[in-house]
Image (cartoon, rainbow, N blue to C red):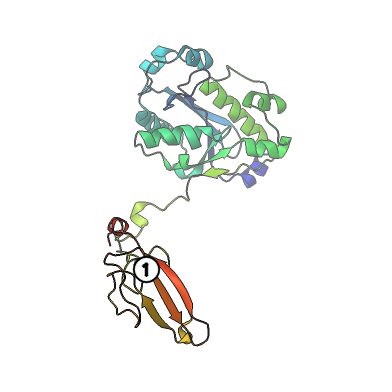
């Protein structure tokens, strides 16, 4: 059986985590913070539970636990008061892995669901500007291999353990007890020949910084500003002119109403007003089509100023 598991295992060890966080009944606490950081190390070949780790974490934004949180998790106020901050908890966990002989690049994090790594830990590290160990960037959601063996339906961790024929050990929502039971379920699935592989990751893991060629700094490239369409008389307009193919040999004539033109009006038409008006009547004479008359609507002085004209 060990040789069968060995052929299917991608990692030397699995580290099973199940965080507990600040919470309140029927409402969402923001931000939620880790208050219990437990982990169980499982051998990647034999499925044996090798070692366990736990530290309590002192929350920064909601330092006083709610009565609902204490009753749900069994965590006491003095536990978190005497705990460490999250940065130290991550460092202690990393040191525990090293002491247990687990290489950081040969371990896979295992959780029941995606919430622990995808939501809770990632959001808190981002909020507090903490760098996670790289192995927390990807993980195995144990629901996926479990459902490949037992079928897909809604079930919580305790129900999954019982469905696998295992005996639940400990208190639900105690982080370390939840992690131990998840680890036992992982071992059971390994013995059944389930494929235990990464199911979720944030990004493709990058090479160490010293192996990455330095990239030149990004430079802003000035983009040309779009030009405002103008009338034949030179005044900005609100809408484009009728377009005629270039091969049509178009001759444009303008009848200008007002002293707004930089071109000479057609013969036979005189300025009828002394103020700039809002429209021009353009006559397009084409050899292939009948004459077209287009009323061109100008921008007002105020609108042109708004567009930096």
Secondary structure under the numbered disc 1 in the rendered image: loop
- Indicate whether 68 appears above or below 164: above
**Is residue 262 or residue 272 the one in the foreground?**
272
Is residue 242 shown to the viewer in this render?
A: no
The residue shown at (71%, 36%) is 152
Across the whole image, how many numbered discs are drawn on residues? 1
Q: Quadrant of residue 163?
A: top right
Residue tagged by mark 1? 229
Tell me: 9 left or right of 287: right
Tell me: 215 left or right of 283: left
Neighbor class of circle 1 (other Cα within 10 Å; few <14, some 14-19, many 20+) is some
Q: Which quarter of the rendering shows the C terminus?
A: bottom left
- Indicate whether 217 appears above or below 58: below
Q: Percent x, y for residue 123?
A: 43, 35
**Is residue 119 or residue 50 the one in the foreground?**
119
The residue shown at (61%, 19%) is 169
Q: Which quarter of the rendering shows the N terminus?
A: top right
Is residue 279 shown to the viewer in this render?
A: yes
Q: Percent x, y for residue 25?
A: 52, 17
Tell me: 254 left or right of 179: left
Q: Quadrant of residue 131?
A: top left
Q: Percent x, y for residue 52?
A: 50, 26
Q: Percent x, y for residue 30?
A: 42, 26
């Amino acid at each position: 059986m060990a040789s069968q598991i060995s052929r299917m295992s991608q990692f030397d060890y699995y580290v099973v985590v199940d965080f507990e966080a600040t919470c309140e009944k029927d409402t969402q606490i923001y931000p939620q913070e880790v208050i219990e950081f437990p982990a169980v190390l499982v051998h990647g070949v034999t499925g044996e539970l090798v070692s366990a780790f736990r530290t309590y974490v002192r929350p920064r934004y909601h330092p006083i636990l709610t009565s609902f949180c204490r009753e749900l998790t069994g965590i006491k106020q003095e536990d978190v008061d005497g705990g460490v901050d999250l940065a130290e908890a991550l460092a202690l966990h990393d040191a525990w892995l090293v002491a247990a002989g687990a290489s950081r690049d040969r371990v896979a994090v295992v959780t029941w669901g995606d919430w622990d790594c995808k939501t809770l830990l990632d959001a808190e590290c981002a909020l507090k500007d903490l760098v996670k160990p790289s192995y927390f960037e990807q993980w195995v959601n144990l629901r996926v291999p479990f459902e490949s063996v037992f079928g897909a339906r809604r079930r919580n961790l305790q129900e999954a353990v019982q469905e696998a024929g295992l005996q639940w050990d400990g208190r639900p929502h105690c982080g370390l007890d939840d992690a131990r039971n998840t680890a036992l379920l992982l071992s059971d699935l390994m013995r059944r020949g389930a494929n235990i592989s990464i199911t979720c990751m944030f990004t493709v893991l990058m090479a160490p910084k010293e192996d990455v060629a330095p990239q030149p700094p990004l430079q802003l490239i000035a983009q040309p500003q779009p030009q405002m369409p103008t009338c034949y008389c030179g005044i900005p307009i609100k809408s484009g002119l009728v377009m005629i193919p270039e091969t049509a040999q178009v001759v444009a004539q303008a009848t200008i109403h007002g002293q707004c033109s930089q071109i000479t009006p057609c013969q036979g038409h005189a300025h009828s007003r002394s103020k700039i008006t809002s429209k021009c009547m353009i006559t397009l004479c084409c050899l292939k089509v009948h004459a077209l008359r287009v009323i061109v609507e100008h921008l007002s002085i105020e609108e042109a100023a708004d567009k930096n004209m």
